[in-house]
Image: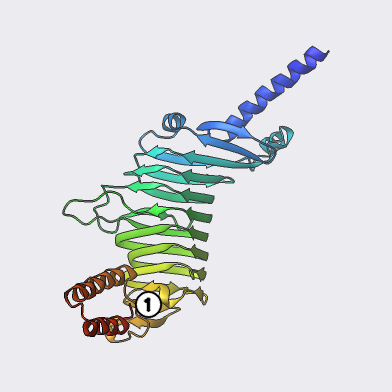
């Protein structure tokens, strides 16, 4: 009897695992604990099952409208969170993501010539990835975008350097971002688009100790907190919401742009003379400071007398060095 019971339990586990593989994407090694089912994606299985021409990541979790399947999920005790982890994966063609009832993390990945389009998602995190796109030489091409009419609950960028590592020869390289989600969080990251826009639409936007640098930056949100970050827009920064008044938590000392608008109010317009809150690029100021110090050191070496030393000190006080 004990042998039959063990055989029955083993058979049940086999059927359970087959059901699990049928319900979630079979693209990696599966590790299960009491609260979560984690799929650690492998390059081999990903390329085998998902990439006919480009990567179609249409994946889901343990949730279904089918009543019979839902009964099996509870019977096999699989009513858990599902998390797909892409760690060290190399993508070399365009990516489309349509995920539901699951979490996705892209960590230490390389996106080579692989623009990202997110159709639907619950929660996706991008962390410490590399981006290289030599094909982004057409105007208005956006490397990272979402389809706004679909539901994306949360996008997180953590320790990211979202910047095109491809350096074009004698041509402009367009490499932008246009995303829409209920919540967007940028933490300890650099999002740089030298010749394109950064557009972020969200109910809630949090930018923590990060840099956004682009030709133009548009933040369409109900609430934005960027008090510990730098926003650099070569042409203009616009923050607001057409429906509600945006709660803006941004220090103007951290904004470097010749044109700044908050909630429809023009705070900076350098060309029209409204320069009260205009601040130069801190990196340029640093270089200018180095130049002045070099000049002062040259004068100091040339004139070593006490009178000239006094003049040097006066110059230093004047330029606040």
Please determine whether, in this image, residue 219 is positioned above or below residue 135. Answer: below
Query: In the image, is 201 to the left or to the right of 321?
Result: right
Q: How many marks?
A: 1
**How far from the left and from the top, in percent, is residue 12?**
71, 23
Q: Residue at x 46, y 50 (%)?
A: 119
Q: Residue at x 43, y 73 (%)?
A: 239
Q: Quadrant of the N terminus?
A: top right
Q: Residue at x 27, y 48 (%)?
A: 166
> Which residue position is annotated with label 1?
260
Q: Secondary structure at mark 1?
A: strand
Q: Nearer the viewer, residue 120 or 170?
A: 170
Query: In the image, is 153 to the left or to the right of 232?
Result: right
**How far from the left and from the top, in percent, is residue 188?**
47, 58
Q: Nearer the viewer, residue 209 or 177?
A: 209
Residue 56: name its quadrant.
top left
**How far from the left and from the top, in percent, is residue 90?**
39, 38
Query: In the image, is 208 to the left or to the right of 168?
Result: right
**For the view shown, which residue lies furthest in the front direction?**
306
Q: Quadrant of the C terminus?
A: bottom left
Please determine whether, in this image, residue 34 is positioned above or below residue 211. Answer: above
**How far from the left and from the top, in percent, is residue 22?**
58, 31
């Amino acid at each position: 009897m004990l042998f039959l019971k063990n055989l029955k339990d083993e058979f049940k586990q086999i059927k359970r695992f087959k059901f699990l593989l049928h319900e979630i994407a079979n693209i990696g090694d599966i590790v299960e604990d009491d609260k979560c089912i984690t799929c650690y994606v492998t390059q081999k299985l990903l390329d085998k099952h998902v990439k006919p021409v480009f990567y179609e990541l249409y994946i889901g979790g343990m949730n279904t409208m089918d009543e019979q399947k839902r009964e099996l999920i509870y019977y096999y005790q699989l009513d858990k969170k599902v998390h797909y982890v892409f760690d060290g994966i190399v993508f070399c063609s365009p990516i489309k993501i349509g995920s539901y009832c699951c979490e996705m993390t892209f960590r230490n990945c390389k996106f080579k010539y692989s623009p990202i389009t997110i159709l639907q998602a619950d929660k996706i995190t991008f962390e410490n990835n590399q981006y290289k796109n030599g094909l982004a030489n057409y105007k208005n091409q956006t490397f990272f975008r979402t389809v706004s009419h679909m539901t994306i609950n949360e996008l997180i960028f953590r320790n990211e350097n979202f910047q095109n590592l491809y350096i074009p020869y004698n041509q402009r390289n367009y490499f932008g971002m246009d995303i829409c989600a209920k919540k967007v969080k940028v933490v300890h990251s650099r999002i740089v688009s030298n010749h394109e826009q950064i557009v972020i639409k969200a109910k809630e936007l949090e930018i923590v100790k990060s840099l956004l640098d682009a030709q133009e930056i548009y933040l369409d949100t109900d609430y934005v907190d960027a008090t510990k970050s730098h926003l650099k827009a070569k042409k203009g920064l616009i923050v607001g919401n057409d429906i509600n008044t945006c709660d803006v938590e941004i220090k103007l000392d951290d904004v470097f742009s010749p044109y700044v608008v908050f909630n429809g109010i023009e705070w900076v317009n350098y060309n029209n003379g409204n320069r009260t809150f205009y601040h130069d690029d801190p990196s340029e100021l640093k270089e200018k400071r180095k130049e002045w110090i070099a000049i002062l050191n040259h004068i100091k070496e040339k004139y070593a007398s006490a009178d000239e030393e006094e003049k040097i000190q006066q110059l230093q006080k004047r330029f606040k060095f």
